Image (cartoon, grey):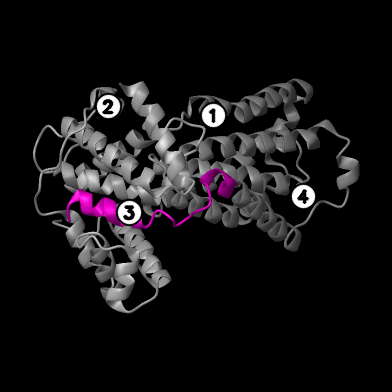
Amino acid sequence: MRTDDLIKALDADARSKAMPLQSAWWMAACAAAVIAAIVFLLTIGPRPDFMTAAHTMRFLSKFVFTIVLAVSAFALVRALSTPGASTGRAMAWMAAAPVLVAVAVVLELFMVPEALWGTRMIGSNMMICMGFIPLIGIGPLAIFLWMLRYGAPTRPVLAGAVAGLLAGGLAATFYAAHCFDDSPLFVATWYTIAIAVLALLGALGGRFFVRW
Amino acid sequence: MSGKDEAELSRLMRAAIAGDEKAYTDFLHRIAALVRGFVRRKIVQGGVDPEDVVQETLLAIHVKRHTWRQDAPVLPWIYAIARFKLIDAFRRRGRRIEIDVDDIAETFAEPEAETVSERDINRALDGLSPAQRSVVSAVSVEGRSIGETAAKFGISETAVRVSLHRGLAAIAKRFGQGRFGRE
């Protein structure tokens, strides 16, 4: 087939329409949040003292970390799914959540006596944390990988990993409402591992599933 | 040169998205020539036919045109897709990638004309369902309109459009998965 012939075919198909990628991302984000909320409420749900806990800094800080992660990953994954879009600024914002966690860890180390560091870090919930963050995040991750297929990521593995971080940030936001371990030492350890699992799955999905 | 191209091409693409088919024809012919120039410059050794990459890029641009943001420049978008398809072609041929992905040589790419040879897209076409293949061939190789194609096969215009759309999407997908041609 000559290229001019191919152009005739593409032309004849010019009327076919698809939803603009950027709008589709917003819909995907809403769908993912709904799925995560349903899985969360059907399984573990918020902790009973949620309203009281909401007055403590440590409890609230968890949401700051996870929401900042989700928002920055959302911006980056949208840029990565668009060919030729600049990603530098979005990439730099990805440092925000880790920096906030690091600052919180340092503050915690100053405030808590050394003897308690271990207890705070181990907490009481680590297995639930490592199980439920991936569980809540797996549905959203599947949606985000579909979105990457719908888009056109020129770096699919990286885009998949960031989709995993986005799913992780979203899942961890819900999970944080359940978890009794509010210490940044716990969050920095176990949330990170659980979210890294999703990022790894996302990278694998990007490698093998996101083809275009 | 590049700045003028940019303004003109994004205008054509916006018009095409708004439903101007003539603008889309114009757009596709211009980017075919640009991408051809870019790809030929990048392929310094044999093994990959530049025109195959041009066709894969055009198909990808077509099926992924919803990824272009209308407020963003169109040339970086086009070259990012062309570069991706070029790297893909090298990878499929099992070659070491010898091109510099951050090269800005695309600004020097001049429009070039096609050379004719056996195309990967013909092999990809063979993988379609018989109905899709005959519709895609009728519209492309035989150059029939949607209406003429519908009359030829005795089916509705909508059915022609659906077969064409699915056929093109299927070819683009096969290219993406590298499941065709001379592996």
Q: Quadrant of residue A37?
A: bottom right
Q: Secondary structure at mark 2?
A: helix
- Compare marks 3 and 1 and give the one earlier in the sequence: 3
Three-letter amino acid code at disc 2?
Glu
**Residue at coordinates 40% horizontally, 38% vertically from top-left?**
B12
Q: Is residue A9 within the magenta segment?
A: yes
- Label 2 neighbour load within 10 Å: few <14, some 14-19, many 20+: many
Looking at the rendering, in which quadrant would you find the C terminus of chain B? bottom left
The answer to whether the residue labelled 1 contacts the one labelled 2, judged by CB atoms less than 8 Å apart, is no
Relative side of B10 to A117, left or right: left
Three-letter amino acid code at disc 4?
His
Three-letter amino acid code at disc 1?
Ala
Q: Which residue is mark 3?
A: A10
Q: Secondary structure at mark 3?
A: helix
Please give the range of residues in magenta: A1-25
In the rendered image, residues at marks 1 and 2 fall on the same chain: no
Q: Secondary structure at mark 1?
A: helix
Name the magenta segment's main secondary structure. helix
- Residue A24 location, x and y as percent? 56, 49
Chain at tag 4: A
- Residue A192 location, x and y as percent? 59, 39
Relative side of A141 to A183, left or right: left
